[in-house]
Image (cartoon, rainbow, N blue to C red):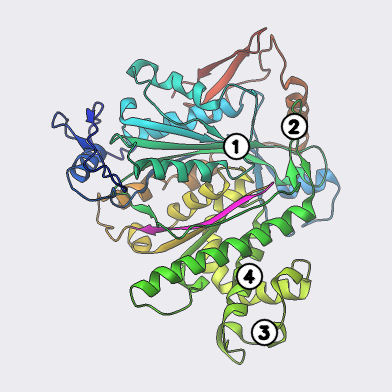
Amino acid sequence: MFRLFSQTRRCLQVKRALQRQEWPLRPAHLTAATQQASFSTVSVEHLSRSDSWPKDVGILALEVYFPSQYVEQVELEKYDGVEAGKYTLGLGQKQMGFCSAHEDINSLCLTVVQRLVERSRLSWDSIGRLEVGTETIIDKSKAVKTVLMQLFQDSGNTDVEGIDTTNACYGGTASLFNSVDWVESSSWDGRYAMVVCGDIAVYATGNARPTGGAGAVAMLVGPEAPLVLERGVRGTHMEHVYDFYKPDLASEYPMVDGKLSIQCYLRALDQCYSVYRKKIQSQWQKVGVDKPFTLEDFQFMIFHTPFCKLVQKSVGRMMLNDFLAAPNPDTQSGLYKGLQAFRGVKLEDTYSDKDVEKAFQKASLEMFSQKTKPSLLLSSRNGNMYSPSMYGCLASLLAQYSAQQLAGSRIGAFSYGSGLAASLFSMRVSQDAAPGSPLDKLVSSLSDLQTRLDARKCVPPEEFAEIMKQREKSHHLVNHTPQGSKDDLFPGTWYLERVDDKHRRQYARRPL
């Protein structure tokens, strides 16, 4: 297994000293008693400065976990008796990963956190915050975060802030924002934050079942990052709507209004993109740049991905926003050629307009292929992971480009959670793509993604359906030991060993 970083270091000895009483508070200073190591050295050097903000806060490392088994969507079409291409062409899906009876939300998150720490050669006491974004609830009181604390037990580190954050697929993004804000705040003690997002997306038999999936993503957050969250430009939209929700706490299955949910997704995209453009254009104007922000200013654009076809439509939707905002778009040649007929449409009237959808989807096809399609590797082959979905797209993007190709680019990111909560934000990729740089290490750490997908076991639809029935029957059972073999799990995977008579869950790890 490759090594991302040099020698691990023991916990940073931290002493907070407020330099001034007025806002903004300056970052704390570390004591001199530290050991030399890669990530932590960056923090020490940064904290010795008198800057008001930690520099370049963002994602330092990223790990992905997905189930070791999947079903082919083309075979699922035959099994379900639907027309050929309904799931593959209509939804844009190739395969769907799913969990065995031995996996639950706790085991997924245990696995991805352990992998990130081990592969990055971190020490457990170098983590000062850990927050989990999930909508997969198996306990109405006890957080997944508290289950993850068993991984910290041997280190003795119990000083770890953060807890679970829930709103459909948005919890991971809320956790990332909270973690970045913690590092940039007066509460920061110089250690790393870790963001964990995981979910199991399963549906009752019917049209929604092929849009399922499962997985988890863990991200390490700190200063001097190769992926820096741009400050002051996040566009957010929230409202009250019942497009997708889970009122039956005895079931894993949601209530879904598919047509409404797609409309809410696109409406939220419109609103978030509008706010984002206003904020970044305002920043540009302050430094003498007077131009409109458009989709072309993102070198890459990733999305929360319920299914891949919706993402392709979303790129067209952003182009429609740009087209309507442009004072004098050229409809005789170039990007907007032939779109003059749509000049007078209003965004709010176009959510069900197939002519608008097809025209802008066609016009944006090249942009989609260049900016977004590479990010759909994991989504097309594993399905919708809910809260980790967009971050799986980020991992897919990083896995398919070199550090040199990514250096200096701006990555746009749209996160959506039903109910609803949505944000559009951006990340700047470091200019330093030299061998051994943080960016080079991040990209290298994800280079095995395709190989790992290819190593999964293909399961026939009949077996998939039977496993889904077993999950229904065993959901919230007590005095229960999951049935079936654990041999198909990836080495190093955590799994549910037993649920006792008081609903207490016991976990074990498959040997590496």
- Which residue is most to the right? 81
- Mark 2 secondary-structure assignment: helix
Judged left or right of residue 66, residue 465 is: right
Q: Earlier in the sequence, mark 2 or mark 1?
A: 1
Q: Residue at x 59, y 19 (%)?
A: 496
Q: Do the CB atoms of the residues marked 1 and 3 lie less than 8 Å apart? A: no
Upstream in sequence: badge 1 or badge 3: 1
Q: Amino acid at mark 3?
A: Leu
Task: Find disc 3 in the rendering and name its residue.
Answer: 339
Q: Residue at x 34, y 17 (%)?
A: 156
| Nearer mark to the viewer, of 2 and 3 | 3
SS at mark 4?
Answer: helix
Q: Is residue 395 visible?
A: yes
**Circle 2 residue:** 463
| Disc 1 from disc 3: Cα separation | 41 Å
The one nearer the camera, 447 or 414, is: 414
Q: Quadrant of residue 275?
A: bottom right
493 vs 382, left or right, is: left
For mark 4, what is the residue?
Answer: 316
